């Protein structure tokens, strides 16, 4: 793990058990956080295949995969193109997770009305 001088000093002084817990949690978070590109690759698809499915140039697919902000309908279309299903879950403190069915229905209707 590469760190700055001060962070490295703090890390070096942590008990081994604490370091292991931190490392394990970091690995969990890394596996939970997949980019669109990683999702596409996990689905065994190329950008060219996605571009044909979305009827857009491959360069636009490449740009989408790097975007940090996009419309939900765009994200839904991309996820559909890789064979997935977009589900939006809200997690509030001290509350069980809530799946937003109404929002996903709105996104579906927006997309259906545009096609």
Image (cartoon, rainbow, N blue to C red):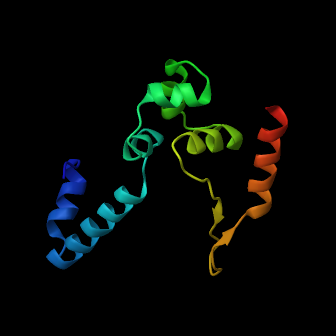
In this rendering, position of residue 28 left or right of residue 79: left
Q: How many marks?
A: 0
The residue lying furthest to the right in this view is: 113
Q: Position of residue 40 (x, y in %)?
A: 44, 41
Residue drawn at x 26%, y 74% as measured from the top left: 21
Q: Horizontal and vertical percent for residue 91?
A: 62, 69
Q: Looking at the rendering, in which quadrant would you find the C terminus? A: top right
Foreground of the two, 31 or 78: 78
Look at 85% across and 37% down and name the residue there.
113
For residue 8, which quarter of the picture?
bottom left
Front-most of 96 and 9?
96
For the point 41% across and 59% down, the residue is 32
Residue at point 23% right, 54% down? Answer: 6
Q: Quadrant of residue 30?
A: bottom left
The answer to which of 99 and 29 lies nearer the viewer is: 99
Whole-percent x, y for residue 51 in the image: 53, 26
Above or below, 47 relative to 109: above
Q: Is residue 42 above or below residue 59?
A: below
Side (left or right) of 29 relative to 71: left
Q: Position of residue 73 (x, y in %)?
A: 70, 41
Image height of 91 relative to 35, above or below: below
């Amino acid at each position: 793990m590469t760190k700055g001088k001060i962070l490295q000093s703090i890390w070096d002084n942590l008990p081994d058990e604490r370091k292991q817990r931190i490392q394990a949690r970091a690995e969990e978070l890394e596996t939970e956080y997949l980019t669109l590109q990683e999702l596409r690759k996990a689905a065994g698809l190329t950008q060219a295949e996605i571009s044909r499915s979305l009827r857009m140039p491959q360069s636009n697919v490449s740009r989408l995969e790097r975007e940090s902000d996009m419309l939900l309908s765009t994200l839904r279309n991309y996820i559909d193109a890789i064979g997935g299903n977009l589900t939006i879950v809200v997690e509030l403190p001290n509350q069980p997770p809530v799946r937003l069915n109404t929002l996903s229905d709105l996104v579906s209707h927006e997309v259906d009305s545009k096609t």
